[in-house]
Image (tube, helix red, strand yellow):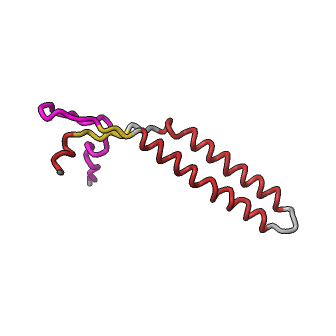
């Protein structure tokens, strides 16, 4: 069973540009919730301001998490590798890099 996993190449092609729009939407959501909290701060009950921020963040977090996870899963590739061909290391792959050595 474990020998079958060596016949596939696992590659994640996710880049920052793929999630950049999601980060911008999240920042806009946070800004709008804080703006609404500041607007409600002058009311007689400032607890409404805190509840508004908490509610907006609480309700938007599942959507943000869903967007990140689905974007990540859409950028994972499993491609079959021929046993006869020798695979080359992927440029920039962290597992192929040498650790930093301290010099003294």
59 or 22, which is in the foreground?
59
User: Residue 91, located in which quarter of the rendered image?
Assistant: top left
Q: Residue at x 59, y 55 (%)?
A: 61
Left or right: residue 99 compared with residue 62: left
Left or right: residue 74 compared with residue 11: right
Q: Residue at x 52, y 49 (%)?
A: 66
20 or 68, which is in the foreground?
68
Q: Which residues are magenta?
A: 79-103
Residue 20 location (% of width, % of height): 55, 39
Residue 54 location (% of width, % of height): 68, 62
* Residue placed furthest toward the top: 85
Please tell me how many numbered marks the rendered image carries: 0
* Residue placed furthest toward the front: 1
Quarter placement of the C terminus: bottom left
Q: Residue at x 37, y 40 (%)?
A: 76
Magenta span contains residue 18: no
Q: Residue at x 47, y 44 (%)?
A: 70
User: Residue 37, located in which quarter of the rendered image?
Assistant: bottom right
Query: In terms of secondary structure, what is the magenta stretch mainly?
Result: loop
Left or right: residue 62 compared with residue 73: right
* Residue placed furthest toward the left: 84
Residue 23 location (% of width, % of height): 57, 44
15 or 74, which is in the foreground?
74
Magenta span contains residue 87: yes
Residue 74 location (% of width, % of height): 43, 39
> Is residue 39 shown above or below 10?
below
């Amino acid at each position: 069973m474990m020998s079958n996993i060596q016949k596939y190449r696992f590659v994640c092609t996710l880049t920052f540009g793929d999630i950049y729009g999601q980060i911008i939407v999240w920042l806009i959501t946070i800004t709008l919730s804080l703006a609404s909290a500041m607007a409600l701060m002058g009311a007689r009950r400032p607890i409404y301001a805190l509840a508004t921020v908490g509610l907006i963040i609480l309700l938007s977090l599942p959507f943000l998490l869903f967007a990140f996870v689905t974007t990540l899963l859409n950028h994972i590739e499993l491609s079959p590798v021929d046993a006869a061909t020798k695979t080359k290391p992927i440029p920039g792959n962290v597992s192929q890099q040498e650790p930093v050595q301290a010099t003294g």
